[in-house]
Image (cartoon, rainbow, N blue to C red):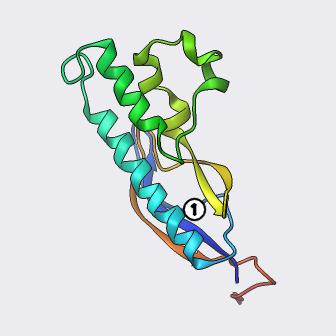
Amino acid sequence: MNFTIEVRYRTGDSFNTFNECECIGAMFDNIDMARKALNTIKEHHHYTREVDGYSFSKDYPTPEDKEAYYKKLSLHDWFLAPDDEFGDEDNMCANNLIHSYTWQHHLMVEVKPDVFQRISAFWIGYFERIHSAEVVINKDFNGQLRIEF
C-alpha cells in the first residue's frame, strides 16, 4: 500500500478566507514512514510559529543569540539550509538565516530509510493557518480506490 499526508488549512486574501485540503508531494511505502513524516511536519510547524512569535530585537537581542537559534534549527533532519536562496551561507547575517523563507516554507521528509524529499509547506504563509494533517492512502496507487458517479 502507498501513503501520503493530507493537510487541511485555511487560506485566502485580504477580502476572503476559505478552507483547503491538499496532499503533500511525497509518497510513503509504509505507514511508519508516513507517521514519521507527520511528526516532522508537526515539529517544523512548531518552529515556524515560534519564529513568527518572536521579536528578535527583544527576545534574541544579540547576533550571537540569533546564530545559536539558527544552529539549533539546523540540527533537525527536516531543516533546509538557505544556500540556494542567498548564496554562500557563511556571508549571511543571523537575522537573514532565521527569517529565511527556505527553511520556513520548505522542509525535508524521509520517504524511505535515509532517503529524503523536499516538500513545500504550502500551509504556511501570511493568510495560511494549518488545521490538521493526517496520513491517508494514496488514491492514485494501483488504480482508483474511489469511484464517483
Image point (47%, 22%), residue name:
97
Q: Is 26 rendered above or below residue 125?
A: below
Q: Position of residue 34 (x, y in %)?
A: 57, 70
Quadrant of the frame with the N terminus = bottom right
Relative depth, front residue between 128 and 137: 137
Compared with residue 95, is residue 1 higher up or lower down, i.e. above or below?
below
What residue is rendered at 39% in x and 35% in y?
72
Residue 84 appears in the picture as rendered: yes
Name the kind of residue labelled 1 in the image. Glu
The vertical placement of 101 against 132, above or below, is above
The answer to whether any part of residue 19 appears in the image is no
- Give 73 or 4, whichever is nearer the viewer: 73
Left or right of residue 81, residue 130 in this image: left
Location of the C terminus by quadrant is: bottom right
Q: Residue furthest top?
A: 91
Q: Where residue 130 appears, x then y in whole percent?
A: 40, 55
- Residue that appears at 57% across and 62% down: 22
Q: From the top left corner, tell me how far across and down residue 76 is, in percent.
A: 48, 45
Q: Write down the quadrant of residue 146 in the picture.
A: bottom right
Residue identified by numbered label 1: 22
Which is nearer the eye, 26 or 61?
61
